[in-house]
Image (cartoon, rainbow, N blue to C red):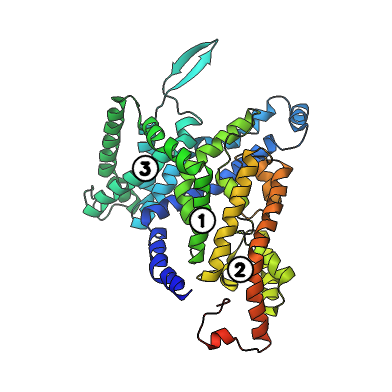
Amino acid sequence: MEKIQRFLETKLLPAATKVAGQRHLAAIRDGFISFIPFLIIGSIFIIIQDFPAPGWQELQVKLFGEFFNQFIILPKRVTYDIMSIFIVAAISYKLAQSYRIDAFSASMLSISAFILLTPITTTIDIDGTSHVVEKVITVGGWYGTNGIIVAIITALVVTEMFNFFIKKGIIIKMPDGVPPAVSRAFSALLPGFVIIVVMLLVRLLFMQTPYENIHDFIYQVVSLPMQSLVANNIFGAIGTVFAISLLWCLGLNGGTIVNGIMRPFWVPLQDENLAAIEAGKVAPNIITEQFFDMIWIGGAGATLAVVLVLLYKAKSKQYKELGKMSLAPGLFNINEPIMFGLPVVLNPVLMLPLLLGPIVITIVNYTAMALEIVARPTGVIIPWTTPPLIQGFLITGHWSGALLQLVDIVIVMLIWLPFIAVMDKKKVAEEAGVPDSKNSKGKMSVSS
């Protein structure tokens, strides 16, 4: 145990901390996080449009007319369906902030570069004949979830180029008496011109290839393989929950690190589910970010089950009190009281149930959804603090989602039960003043 703990503290923790603090990964993570509230707003209107109740669609038409269904979904169109524009601006802004340069100019240049790289034509069908319409920024498509990878690359590249020009002083410098706002605007002129020219050349380059644009190239070469090999299969799901739980063992918020990397590949899958639900079809994808939200019952590690074990099985006063204090946060998926109070962080003994629990229920949930025993995630995003069971119902749009989370809680409780029993027995002895014979011989305590 001591060797494991030493390895965690001296090898794994520094490496994980370095990855978590990496400037570009942090910008991607924070950029997505800053946009999540708008996705939740869009999701609320999706729920209103497709609330999982018999006769809901007919009732909407009866009360508000047949066009209400498409009217109420407009907030989704201006959040989900043009999210790549928002994402490129948000990531660029966050990265520029980390460099302490003009974040507004960087984000505006990134938006311009992204639109420059993106097709501004669309095809419409009129009386069975396809017509190409020029000069159109479409709702959805490359401006929606399909363009997220290019949005990320564009934000990083443009901001790095802008930072290079600013830090090297390759800018138009205004006299001292000029107002700061005007001076900053002219500082962006030269680097902005070069960036736009470079992006124009990139567009021209891809026009000479069979892909015709960078979006189709990235989608075919990067996005589709990543979705099939990592993001949208059971092995990728197991690896994801393992990585998140392992990082939590080190005291790092694994969700913000891993989700920041995987989210660009989950979002298109989620959008496919939304489109299918809107068309009255079954959601095609099981693995979306909401699938993992259902796993983290009480927070990363599914620790609400640990709280319940402490409340109903622990005899130690300390563990009983910890269970009581952790219940309210756990019901809103806040796991810090358990992680740092039990503690789980940097505790080699409790690494096993923390890693094993999420893996087991990931397999159970995936199997249940693959066999169509439980409804799949609809793609709707809800606040991460939504209590379990309610969360499962809203994510799947079906009562089976709530029942599945209840089964998950029982499974994780059974996994944790023997570990809590051993710790509780030692803690009861400590509280009674009985010396620990193992510790007196210099061996490690399970509850340390």
> Disc 1 marks which residue?
242
Tell me, yes or no, if residue 293 can be seen here.
Answer: no
Q: Check if mark 1's residue and mark 2's residue have beta carbons within 8 Å.
A: no
Residue 205 position (above or below residue 2): above
Instruction: Give the CA distance from mark 2 to mark 3.
Output: 38 Å
The amino acid type found where label 1 is placed reads: Phe
State which mark lies toward you, 2 or 3: 2
* Secondary-structure class at tag 2: helix
* Residue at screen point 71% across, 41% down: 398
Residue 417 position (above or below residue 174): below
Could you tell me residue 135's position as x and y percent?
41, 24
- Viewer-proximal residue, 426 or 210? 426
Could you tell me residue 127's position as x and y percent?
55, 10
Which sits earlier in the primary sequence, circle 1 or circle 2? 1
Badge number at residue 338? 2
* Secondary-structure class at tag 1: helix
Instruction: Give the CA distance from mark 1 to mark 2.
Output: 18 Å
Residue 298's image quarter? Answer: bottom right
In this picture, residue 355 sits left or right of residue 134: right
> Disc 3 marks which residue?
153
The amino acid type found where label 3 is placed reads: Ile
Q: Residues within 10 Å of mark 1 (few under 14, many from 20)?
A: many
Tell me, yes or no, if residue 150 can be seen here.
Answer: yes
- Viewer-proximal residue, 28 or 270? 270
Which sits earlier in the primary sequence, circle 2 or circle 3? 3
Quadrant position of the C terminus in the picture: bottom right
